[in-house]
């Protein structure tokens, strides 16, 4: 099974089929929520100029997290969103980088406390975490690069669900929480500065 998900993901990317938001959940039905969050937040997690398109991905990730919290078994997206193409910025630049990252984690990780990821309550809690990190990425100051850290947190949490590895989960939580703390600290500093000026 080692490397199976990375191979499956790369095969899907190179399939030549039209790739839409809906395809992500359908192609990886068993882990559809985590895979969709992983792929969506891969672009905000990379230091790439995106022209604000990442806010769409972050909004969809919040929806995915909310469905996890509600305990849905299958991923639901509005029809218009399901049919929206992922676009070359994601499929040609961000996702190949994520494939390499997944492959690296698959080589170095193993199933640790896998039973945790089978509990519905744990998945609901992780859905809340994904929502929090995605919102933090969306609220990060433009062009600051601070959205990278909470986005990486989502990537780590989602990858932990896919790989069923609590150590990967811990890494994702640390990175994401650190990113949220940085954004909050910067926001507080800006508010303080504005307060002193006025």
Image (cartoon, rainbow, N blue to C red):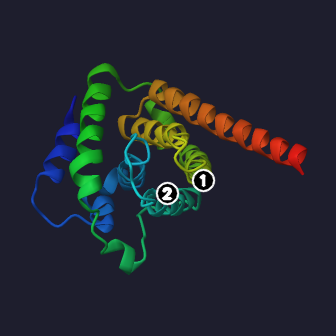
Crowding near the residue tagged with mark 2, few <14, some 14–19, many ≥20 C-alpha atoms within 10 Å: many
| Coordinates of residue 174 in the picture (x, y in percent) | 58, 28
Q: Is residue 53 above or below residue 194?
A: below
Q: Secondary structure at mark 1?
A: helix
> What residue is at 37 percent from the left and 40 percent from the top?
162
Q: Secondary structure at mark 2?
A: helix
**Residue 62 left/right relative to 186:** left
Residue at the extreme bottom: 80
> What residue is at 23 percent from the left and 58 percent from the top?
88
Image disc number at residue 35: none
| Coordinates of residue 150 in the picture (x, y in percent) | 54, 41
- Closer to us: 44 or 3: 44
As measured in the structure, the alpha-carbon distance from the residue carrying label 2 to the one carrying label 1 is 7 Å
- According to the image, label 1 marks what residue? 135
Q: Tell whether label 1 touches label 2 (CB within 8 Å).
A: yes
Q: Earlier in the sequence, mark 2 or mark 1?
A: 2
> What residue is at 60 percent from the left and 53 percent from the top?
135
Number of numbered markers: 2
Q: Is residue 195 above or below residue 19?
A: above
> What residue is at 60 percent from the left and 48 percent from the top?
140
Image disc number at residue 58: 2
Crowding near the residue tagged with mark 1, few <14, some 14–19, many ≥20 C-alpha atoms within 10 Å: many
């Amino acid at each position: 099974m080692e490397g199976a998900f990375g191979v499956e993901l790369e095969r899907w990317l190179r399939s030549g089929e039209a790739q839409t938001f809906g395809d992500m959940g359908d192609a990886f039905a068993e882990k559809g929520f985590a895979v969709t969050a992983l792929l969506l937040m891969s672009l905000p997690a990379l230091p790439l100029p995106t022209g604000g398109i990442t806010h769409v991905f972050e909004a969809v990730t919040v929806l995915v997290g909310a469905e996890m919290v509600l305990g849905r078994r299958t991923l639901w997206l509005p029809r218009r969103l399901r049919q929206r193409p992922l676009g070359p910025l994601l499929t040609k630049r961000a996702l190949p980088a994520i494939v390499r990252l997944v492959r690296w984690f698959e080589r170095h990780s193993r199933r640790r406390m896998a039973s945790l990821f089978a509990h519905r309550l744990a998945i609901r809690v992780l859905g809340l975490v994904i929502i929090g990190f995605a919102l933090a990425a969306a609220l990060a100051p433009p062009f600051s690069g601070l959205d990278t850290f909470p986005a990486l947190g989502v990537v780590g949490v989602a990858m932990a669900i896919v790989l069923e590895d609590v150590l990967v989960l811990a890494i994702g939580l640390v990175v994401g929480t650190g990113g949220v703390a940085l954004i909050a600290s910067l926001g507080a500093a800006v508010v303080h500065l504005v307060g002193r000026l006025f």
